[in-house]
């Protein structure tokens, strides 16, 4: 039985729907005078952040506190702590302190997996974003937001996102959000299209369960939700695209482009937004943009994940342990097509 | 031939019995709550919610019927009814895998200063009701809390009693009490059976 | 000196024969040789090979004695059936002067387990900017003939051209670590399906292949020979095959791990699988095996790269690259090449002894198993089956990717110039 949440690819459809349904109940707690539930009373959760991320950290912290957990924040960013042995040492320190679960954000892909499988600690590990690998709670909150908007909070209960057309636009190559979303949205039955300049699409994407397009304008009218990924300006220096202006012109979402989306379609962004780069202020501030909702939903999703992994004597989420079947979903036979292309 | 089978669940209340005792409970509530003007019914999922909804309908019939005995405001008055999920307040939460959550739906009037009547199908150890009182505590401060149950089967483990009881059903711990309601189970009945784990030699 | 009679060994996998060692030389090879007071080693069912030669070993001394020393490294070599190893230059300080190579050479002599032939750096400090004193290293006591910046690529085309030309004066060879540096910035694993999924920086095959293509053309242009370290891709094989067909004087090596392991293993994020060049795909593995069988790839070299435990007991990105290999190389080659029918034992002798000795100019090594030759010999039991247990390694480091994996074959005896360095699997 799986005790960790490392990758969105590990979640079965039933697991994912259970998390979304549980989050729906958790969301209602926010409307109560006392925004607190006793599920994790007496349990200690450590937020182990090797990378700055105030947003994600306070979202987890809010979720943990609403479930009455004791919270330890460990900001390990900087100097010597970024070295490898320190992850192990830090983990063992936390273990010795009797931490019941670790929420980890790390700049190195695979660090949470390593933490969960290396035998350094026994506590359940929740991945709060690792390198350019995975950010499963972000994908869950995105799916939750889509289900609420496109189907409805109550009508969506028990449902996936079957047949919904979701478009992700931007720096897919460096995006853990994109990887997690492709995995989860596919599991939930959605049709995913990635749109980016070819330089920002990873080699090997052909095995992902999604479509790839280089043309935003032709994709927008066929989208129920358009998720804009953050594009860091530093990418320009590494020649991923020539100028900010050219990027915005080809892949940015402005009012004109938004008008080409179906009337019901929403605009999403994992934040923080780079206004003027991938999204204009007009779009970011429009009714159709769910950025603020996504933040609120993030707390509900993280409450659901924490409750389902830690609330009982064993996890309610049934996906297999990564040690036995690491990220099997996309592990198709090694494709050699790329070498033949050369 | 006697096809006697001691394992088979035996109905102790049938559909009409259940309707009758709910009507009686509704009348008792109106009587004790002096018209039920500030009553809020909160059912405990799953079947307590359906019972609460039925009770609300009965109360509306009584107090809301034109010329009815408790009709100070005229016909059609709605009795607020909701649900109260107690999953995360259970004292055995850590002894099982986490359960799926049920809906907590508090009527828009809220519960502050009102008479909350908790509604459940079976009163047994009392632990569910204790959890419900805790859950209620996080939602507001009622004027008073009362408890209505369809069946009280005894064996209390906490100092808790019901204010309104459909049927007192003395049972042994080896027996099971199962409430079926049309909304969930397709029929109305209260069934008394033996625990399936009972050794065969006990017959 | 004492005499040793190896009785009934299958010399190069052929018919059982007796081999008599007298002193440091092979005195006689034949059937029914008389023991005549010699110590007898019963070798029925075992394979006798010329002592193995590794053209690519990291002994780490001087500078990283926490991971390996010349002594522990040569003990590991003897355990694996090697009688000669070429020690890579990326030590601290770098082996880019006569002083450092002579020190390593002397330490090898003192160890007594295996001959150590130092490799000299091509450029000062492995920085790729300025040629090291290649001639001085050649003329030193170490007599360096192989030069390599291994660990780093000589990526400047002009420096590479000059090095290829310069070593012609004394018959040297440049061994290139083919890795285009700009294409591999931040690279963590083979770029492909698995890297896309794992979010690890991609290490494209083209970064290796483009350098190999450039260097074989440079070698052709200046009429030099060039050696390519650790080929890892099917594309590299194609380029070397093309270059050889064109008459270019190129030789190439493959590591045991690239003959067996693929990038699918990286899914575990276990840094024991982190290596340079990275593990590639199944298709590459098959191409490498085929190329080794048909001679496109000349030799197997271990790229034995010891690292202390803490450099691997961490997250992937922070981990060091490299695997130990001396003590498992022959087993992996048996498993991937012999047991699959791709290579005979004589073919193994060619690729793990004769050819590497020829390329590196290892005097007295890589010789035929016949009378009058130096008694550098390796005896292995090909029927042995057992799981790899790093606890039993002679190497100071344990970073093997084969822990717990069952591999065939086991080296039981190694003789260095007639002196037994390994007897019944035990170092002497």
Image (cartoon, rainbow, N blue to C red):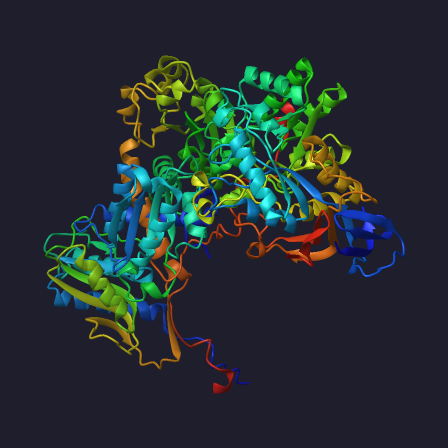
Please state the horizontal and vertical placement of residue A338, each as a whole percent of the image. 60, 27
Q: Residue at x 32, y 40 (%)?
A: A80
Please state the horizontal and vertical placement of residue C171, each as a whole percent of the image. 68, 24
* Residue located farthest toward the front when viewing the structure as drawn: C1
- In the rendered image of this protein, does residue C146 appear above or below residue B54? above
Q: Quadrant of the C terminus of chain C?
A: bottom right
Please state the horizontal and vertical placement of residue B73, each as a whole percent of the image. 11, 52
Q: Residue at x 23, y 63 (%)?
A: B132
Please state the horizontal and vertical placement of residue A260, each as a whole percent of the image. 39, 19
Say which quarter of the image contains residue A130.
Answer: top left
Say which quarter of the image contains residue A250.
Answer: top left
Q: Is residue B49 visible?
A: no
Q: Quadrant of the N terminus of chain C?
A: bottom right
Q: Of residues A37 and C292, which is closer to you in this image?
A: C292
- In the rendered image of this protein, does residue A17 appear above or below residue A204? below
Say which quarter of the image contains residue A100.
Answer: bottom left
């Amino acid at each position: 039985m799986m005790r960790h949440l490392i990758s969105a690819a590990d979640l079965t459809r039933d697991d994912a729907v259970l998390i979304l349904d549980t989050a729906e109940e958790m969301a209602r707690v926010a409307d109560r005078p006392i925004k607190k539930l006793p599920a994790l009373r007496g349990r200690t959760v450590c937020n182990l952040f090797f990378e700055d991320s105030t947003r994600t950290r306070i979202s987890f912290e809010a979720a943990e506190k609403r479930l009455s957990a004791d919270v330890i924040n460990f900001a390990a960013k900087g100097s010597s702590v970024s070295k490898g042995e320190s992850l192990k040492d830090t983990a063992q320190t936390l273990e010795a302190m009797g931490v019941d679960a670790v929420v980890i954000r790390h700049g190195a892909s695979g660090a949470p997996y390593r933490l969960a499988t290396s035998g350094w600690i026994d506590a359940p590990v929740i991945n709060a974003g690792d390198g350019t690998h995975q950010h499963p709670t972000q994908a869950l909150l995105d799916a939750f937001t889509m289900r609420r908007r496109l189907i409805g909070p109550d009508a969506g209960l028990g449902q996936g996102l079957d047949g919904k057309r979701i478009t992700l636009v931007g720096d897919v190559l460096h995006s853990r959000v994109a990887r997690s979303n492709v995995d989860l949205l596919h599991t939930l039955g959605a049709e995913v299209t990635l749109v980016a300049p070819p330089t920002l699409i990873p080699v090997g994407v052909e095995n992902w369960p999604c479509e790839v397009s280089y043309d935003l304008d032709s994709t927008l009218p066929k989208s129920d939700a358009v998720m804009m990924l953050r594009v860091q300006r530093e990418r320009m220096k590494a020649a991923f695209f020539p100028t900010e202006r050219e990027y915005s012109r080809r892949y940015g979402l402005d009012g004109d482009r938004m008008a080409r989306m179906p009337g019901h379609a929403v605009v999403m962004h994992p934040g923080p937004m780079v206004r003027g780069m991938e999204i204009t202020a007009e779009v970011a501030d429009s009714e159709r943009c769910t950025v603020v909702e996504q933040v609120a939903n993030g707390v509900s999703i993280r409450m659901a994940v924490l409750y389902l992994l830690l609330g009982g004597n064993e996890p309610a989420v049934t996906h297999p342990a990564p040690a036995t079947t690491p990220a099997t979903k996309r592990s198709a036979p090694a494709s050699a097509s790329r070498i033949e292309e050369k | 031939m006697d096809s006697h089978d001691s394992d088979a669940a035996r109905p102790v209340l049938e559909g009409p019995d259940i309707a009758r005792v709910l009507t009686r409970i509704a009348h008792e509530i109106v009587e004790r709550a002096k018209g039920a003007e500030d009553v809020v019914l909160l059912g405990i999922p799953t079947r307590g919610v359906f019972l609460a909804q039925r009770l609300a309908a009965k109360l509306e019939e009584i107090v809301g019927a034109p010329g009815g005995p408790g009709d100070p405001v005229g016909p059609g008055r709605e009795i607020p009814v909701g649900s109260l999920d107690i999953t995360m307040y259970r004292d055995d939460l850590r002894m099982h895998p986490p359960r799926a959550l049920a809906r907590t739906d508090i009527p828009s009037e809220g519960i502050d200063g009102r008479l909350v009547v908790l509604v459940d199908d079976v009163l047994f150890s009392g632990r569910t009701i204790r959890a419900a009182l805790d859950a209620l505590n996080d939602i507001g401060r009622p004027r008073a809390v009362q408890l209505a149950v369809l069946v009280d089967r005894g064996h209390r483990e906490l100092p808790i009693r019901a204010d309104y009881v459909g049927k007192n059903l003395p049972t042994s711990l080896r027996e099971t009490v199962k409430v079926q309601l049309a909304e969930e189970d397709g029929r109305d009945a209260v069934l008394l059976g033996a625990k399936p784990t009972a050794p065969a030699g006990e017959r | 000196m004492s005499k040793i009679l190896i009785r009934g060994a299958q010399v190069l996998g052929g018919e059982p024969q007796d081999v008599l060692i007298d002193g440091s030389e092979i005195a006689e090879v034949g059937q029914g040789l008389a023991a005549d007071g010699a110590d007898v080693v019963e070798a029925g069912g075992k394979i006798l090979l010329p002592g193995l030669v590794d053209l690519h070993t990291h002994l780490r001394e001087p500078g990283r004695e926490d991971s390996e020393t010349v002594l522990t490294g040569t003990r590991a070599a003897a355990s694996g059936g090697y009688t000669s190893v070429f020690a890579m230059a990326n030590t601290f300080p770098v082996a880019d002067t006569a002083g450092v190579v002579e020190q390593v050479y002397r330490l090898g002599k003192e160890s007594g387990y295996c001959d150590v032939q130092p490799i000299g750096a091509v450029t000062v400090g492995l920085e790729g900017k300025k040629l090291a004193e290649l001639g001085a290293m050649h003329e030193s006591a170490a007599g360096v003939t192989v030069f390599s910046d291994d660990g780093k690529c000589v990526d400047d085309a002009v420096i590479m051209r000059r090095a290829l030309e310069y070593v012609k004066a004394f018959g040297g060879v440049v061994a290139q670590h083919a890795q285009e540096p700009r294409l591999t910035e931040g690279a963590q694993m083979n770029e492909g399906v698995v890297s896309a999924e794992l979010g690890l920086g991609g290490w494209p095959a083209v970064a290796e292949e483009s350098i190999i293509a450039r260097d074989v053309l440079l070698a052709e242009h200046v009429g030099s020979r060039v050696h390519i370290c650790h080929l890892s891709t099917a594309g590299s094989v194609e380029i070397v095959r093309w270059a050889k067909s064109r008459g270019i004087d190129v030789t190439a090596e493959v590591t045991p791990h690239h003959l067996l392991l693929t990038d699918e293993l990286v899914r575990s994020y276990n840094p024991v699988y982190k290596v340079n060049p990275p593990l590639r795909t199944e298709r590459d593995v098959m191409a490498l095996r085929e190329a080794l069988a048909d001679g496109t790839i000349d030799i197997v070299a271990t790229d034995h790269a010891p690292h202390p435990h803490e450099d691997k007991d961490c997250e992937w990105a922070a981990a060091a690259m490299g695997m130990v290999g001396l003590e498992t190389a022959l087993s992996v080659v048996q498993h991937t090449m012999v047991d699959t029918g791709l290579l005979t034992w004589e073919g193994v002798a060619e690729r793990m002894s004769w050819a590497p000795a020829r390329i590196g100019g290892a005097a007295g090594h890589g010789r035929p198993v016949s009378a009058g030759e130096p008694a550098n010999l390796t005896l292995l039991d090909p029927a042995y089956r057992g799981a790899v247990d790093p606890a039993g390694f002679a190497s100071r480091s344990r970073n093997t990717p084969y822990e717990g994996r069952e591999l065939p074959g086991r080296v039981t005896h190694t003789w260095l110039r007639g002196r037994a360095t390994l007897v019944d699997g035990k170092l002497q």
